[in-house]
């Protein structure tokens, strides 16, 4: 990772989160990847953090002077979408 990241550089393309957004989250108290994710939505887009999580972790490490194991990783989640009770119950009304 380059040393001089500008605040306007995009980190999470899915949610349009910038380096500056991540730095603000850290200044507001975020201390790991999950806390940054909750404050900025970085890693909550279509790729679920596969593209940006490592960069978010590296920014946290650099800003706080901590190791990668302390910055951690976010909890992986499966993509969710609404499902009708008919689909769950199998009554055929959702067709």
Image (cartoon, rainbow, N blue to C red):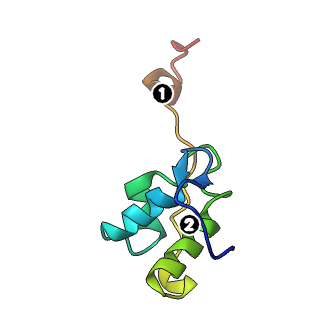
Q: Which mark is residue 56?
A: 2
Disc 2 on helix, strand or loop? helix
**Picture coordinates of residue 70, whole percent (x, y):** 48, 84
**Picture coordinates of residue 51, whole percent (x, y):** 68, 57
Q: Quadrant of residue 40?
A: bottom left
Query: How many residues crowd around disc 2 within 10 Å: few (fewer than 14), some, or many (20 or more)?
Result: many
Mark positioned earlier in the residue sequence (2 or 1): 2
Q: Residue 91 versus residue 40: which sits nearer the camera?
A: 40
Which part of the image, by quadrant, shows the C terminus? top right
Q: Are marks 2 and 1 in contact (CB under 8 Å)?
A: no
State the separation of the CA atoms marked 2 and 1. Answer: 41 Å
Position of residue 89 relative to residue 3, above or below, is above
Q: Residue at x 57, y 50 (%)?
A: 78
Q: How many marks?
A: 2
Q: Residue 55 versus residue 48: which sits nearer the camera?
A: 55
**Picture coordinates of residue 20, whole percent (x, y):** 47, 59
Q: Is residue 76 left or right of residue 26?
A: right
Q: Residue at x 56, y 66 (%)?
A: 56
Q: Is residue 33 left or right of residue 5?
A: left
Q: Where does label 1 land, which residue?
A: 89
Q: Quadrant of residue 46?
A: top right
Query: How many residues crowd around disc 1 within 10 Å: few (fewer than 14), some, or many (20 or more)?
Result: few
Q: Residue at x 52, y 34 (%)?
A: 81
Position of residue 14 relative to residue 35, above or below, is above
């Amino acid at each position: 990772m380059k040393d001089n990241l500008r605040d306007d550089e995009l980190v999470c393309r899915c949610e349009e989160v910038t380096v500056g957004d991540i730095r603000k989250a850290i200044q507001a108290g975020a201390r790991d990847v999950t806390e940054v994710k909750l404050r900025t939505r970085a890693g909550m887009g279509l790729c679920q953090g596969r593209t940006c999580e490592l960069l978010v972790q590296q920014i946290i490490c650099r800003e706080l002077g901590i190791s990668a194991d302390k910055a951690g990783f976010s909890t992986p989640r499966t993509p969710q979408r609404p499902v009708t009770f008919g689909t769950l119950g199998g009554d055929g009304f959702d067709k």
